[in-house]
Image (tube, rainbow, N blue to C red):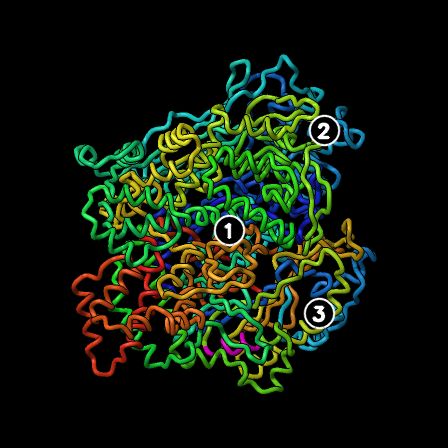
Amino acid sequence: MQGLSRKRDPKTRGLSPHFLSPRFAKKCGVCPRCSPKNAGTVPAFLAIFLALLFSPKIALAEEPNTSPANAATTNTSAAHASAAATAQPTKFELDIQPILTARGCNSGPCHGKSRGQNGFALSLLGFDSDMDFRSIVTDARGRRVTPAAPADSLLLQKATANLPHGGGKKLEIDSPDYQTLLQWIQSGFPRTSDSDPTLTQVSISPAPKPLAPGEELNLKVTATYSDGSARDVTLTSAYQSNEPAVLAVKPDGKIRAGSLPGEATIMARYMGNIATWSSAIPRPDPVDPKIYAQLPRKNFIDDLVYERLSQLNIVPSKPASDSQFLRRAYIDVIGRQPSREETRSFLQDPNPNKRYALIDALLERPEYADNWANKWADLLRPNPYRVGIKAVLSLDTWIRDAFRQNIPYDQFVRGILTARGSNWKNGAVTIFRDRREPEEIVTMVSQLFLGIRMDCAKCHQHPFEVYGQHDFYSFAAFFSRVGFKGTGLSPPISGGEETVLVKSSGEVRHPLTGKALTPKTLRGSEVPIAEGQDPREKLVEWMISESNPTFAQVAVNRVWAELFGIGIVDPVDDLRATNPPSNPKLLDQLAAHFRTIGFNQKELLRTILQSHVYSLSSEPNETNRGDHRNFSRHYRQRLRAEVLADAICDITETTQAYAGTPNGTRAMQLWTVRTESELLDAFGRPDPNQDPPCERIPESTVVQALHLMNAPAIASKITDENGLAKRLASSEMTPSQIVEDLYLASFSRFPDPNELSDLVSEFGKPNNDRRKLVEDILWSMLNSPEFTHKD
Amino acid sequence: MLRRNLLQLGVAGLAGGSFANLLQLRQASAASMPSNKKPASCILIWMDGGPTHFETFDPKPEAPVEIRGEFQPINTNVQGIQICEHLPQLASIAHKYAIVRSVCHNQGNHGAGNHYMMTGAPPRIPVGCGAFVSFHPSLGSVAAKERPAPHGLPPYFSMPSMSRSGGPNFLGAKYAPFVVGGDPSNKHFRVRDVELPSGISDDRFASRRDLRHLVDRLPRFSDPATADPVVAVDEFVQQGIELITTPDAQKAFDIHSESDATRDAYGRNSFGQRALLARRLVEAGVPFVTLYDGGWDHHSDLFGALKTRLPSWDQTVAALINDLDQRGLLETTMVIALGEFGRTPKISTLPGQAKAGRDHWANAMSILFAGGSTPGGQVIGATDRQGHSACERILAPENFVSTVYLKMGIDPDKVYYTPSGRPTHLVSDPTPIKELM
């Protein structure tokens, strides 16, 4: 299952200067807080370079001048002369901090890292004005500013490289920015007072509109202040496009539509505030509206997908054949191929509603639980070397049990988040055993269940989001009363029993202010917790409530991505204004529907599988060949490692023994990735030693091709004395019956007349041994993409 | 040459000033392109984790004790060049390689540093320390695309695992490294799944392939815009079949045919034997081999660990350079050893650790660069007295990868188009390190 990239490198544990719990700090890499040892003298150009990290200049690789040497000279444009423009006295927050940000002074490799640079520390990208003011004006006995002789101030002397400055020359004397700084020191370093306007909003003009391929447009970014005044901050904002190929943006705010149809969102960031601008570039040739009107529709999914496609002038592909639908639905719902008999009876069934009947039947199959538990285990299963193998087993049991009972999703999440008890008895507590500190569990919870990535906000304002440290630690405070009793971690065995409990009190403190924080929901309000109460109960209440739309959105998006190969939002667990869904209405309606049906995942699957959109063919037409996000065709996917491993056993009528498991255990039922299997490794199951461990490799590789061709384990299944090939070859069946059975078993369809006659004629060749021939056909089928891929 | 210049001038004149710069850059890199030399192959020794520059190729004996560390420098056979005392064999052949001491960058965590050094492009979004990311094609993948592969062998090998960011990114999975796992120092070493399973003769394999053509009829959607994953599978299957059926390919893997003396010279350990296998592959015509050599992230016990590790590493790398030299292959084979960054000047003991180490440090690093007609016996650039940062001939990862590309006969200023049609320069600054050319 896609999502939840956890960043946990055991090697780097214990290295971070993160504040509260340095041992398990997550690293983002934006700032040297996350690469703490990289302190010291940084060459000048490097400072600028990281300042550009979020700038589209880096994102757009066609820019020829992105080398460090060039960057230093090309991107030190004047911040702005806004103070002069508004004829106000120069104020620290309004005028000085934007300069520090634009010049890269407070960027990660320079003074913005947590320890600062050579004793001078600023907050990263200027998110903490008080700290920055103190650093400049009062710290180090005020040596950085000299009111008596403002031009001699260390701040200016260093920035202009009059005195040796590790960061090199940042300001030209007499540049507007220099003048602004000088004026600010001259006037006694004024700060904004309560009566001063504060930055309230950043907006982009003109209003979003569809663009033609190749069309250019100058965006203007305006900062609005609480007194109603506004400034043009176009040149001091940073920009990023989520799809640079569709819509590129330059550092001056100029955007250009690419040659391909699609949608993109531009983000502009100014002083911690973000504005977005979304646009679509439709295919240039309009499509007759009648075509959409005539499309078959089962439910709202069809309506909303077709509506989106009509906006983009894309026509959906034809419906898939019965056999394509059959195999697709089997693999998606229960993670296995239909058997020969199942295929034969479905394909020969004249009932016009047989697809609906099939969906209903599949949802009742016992394999459903293993298939979906296997996907969720990817997301929840910790490294067994860390938490202990028994804890991993009990978590796996818990997950499988939840899917066996089809526990509504909200209860499933509640079961995890409020878990207490022994790690040997209640598997859900394993999550807390793994992520022991509030700051650790909170990033997982927010990403997995809310689609919100909080990691950045742990140390500084999230660069693409509204969250900052206060939000992070207030949210983490919901986990402040999680306590432990018993035997903790002792990697690499960690075999002990431990009980997760709720303490009567506990707190999370803000790392800078040291203040104990009341739990606060994201973008919401504080939630006071009475003594003896479990704050996690309150958290779950808020999470699953209707006031919190992302809970259901991220859930339906994840299920959707499993079926279609890509989420409506991609990555599946990164829901934010700067990463919009490809079809917002569809996401909203699916989420609303999920809530209406009581978070019943089987019902959700039923709704999606019944839609015509789900059963579209993968074959593109002229209008949708380039579509990868709007579901106008089915996107082919390689089978997951476990599905493939089980399918090979099913087709060849053999079993695979997995060490330490009962006979007949299927790959889908393995509860730890420590179970050895070359096949599963070759086909990209998660590696617990990799970081993040849950990452699956969906691509094909030459290693996979070689493995299917030559692996001794697969070769022996094809030639097994009790296997399919031997059975067919030694039976009384005619060649055409044998060929038909092989097609039904491997490809879930009947051979067409050409295929049948081609292969039957092979049986007539004088030198062909019947058994060897059947084995070789079987080998050929297992080595064909019609088997390895879901079409 | 004259006509070409005129043409370029003409175009520049027509297109206006902004173009002129670009063309000058290209001209510069074209001029430094070795014109009639055979393009070099590359054996990249990737010291993952970030090797210390102090204890390898940039000792600072004059620095205070908390910086200079426990090891002493030794003289090499080239006057004025000193390296670490635990690299005696390399010290005796310093005329065969150059040391670059002044490449630096700004990515102090493993995921990002790996990406920058391995691709020449800084990561475009924040990258986690443990991450395995790809935003741009790696050196090896570009070599795989641009350089012809010997018949039946993949053009890009990585042993025993893929390096981080060593992938093809938008060039497509067919330019991913062929990973040869396992330990070639093992008596029973063989390349997994490359041999036919027992009982399957070459003839039977051939008839299976014929049958497969009859059976495999799933339609392919060949338009690149459709990005049909099945199209990629076809290439992998073809690659796999060639690997299995070409005798040269099988022979290149047969490390057991080397003499005991040669195998001993490289060191009878997995790294040593992998280096020998790399030489066999290069000899067979493979243009790029990565020897992934992990575990250089010495936050603690730096001196204890290196005291045992450096001597055998020294033996292998020196043996590789000497062996290539004796076979006349060094002129056309680069041997490059580096990691993602250097390490902190100040020795530190992390909380909970008993022994001291050095931490991540991207402001300075050392690169060993041999072969491929690189003038040896020289040091390029320098760090300051205490090894804090590069202070002479400050070079960027872009310069490093451009040098490697030029030596491989690949224009670092080449423009690629991503599958969605976006033009992308291979290296944003295509200026090579001229001293190495």
Location of mark 3 (residue): B310
Within the magenta stretch, is there residue B357? no
Location of mark 2 (residue): A504
Location of mark 1 (residue): A695
Mark 3 and mark 1 in contact? Answer it, CB < 8 Å. Answer: no
The x and y percentages for residue A76 are 56, 38
**Is B164 situated left or right of B68 in this image?**
left
Amino acid identity at mark 1 = Glu
Dot 1 falls on which chain? A
Q: Earlier in the sequence, mark 2 or mark 1?
A: 2
Tell me: residue A179, above or below residue A620.
Answer: above
Residue nearest the viewer, comparing A625 with B422:
A625
Amino acid identity at mark 3 = Leu
Under circle 3, the secondary element is: helix
Give the magenta part as a residue range.
Answer: B275-284
For marks 2 and 1, give the CA distance.
37 Å
Dot 2 falls on which chain? A
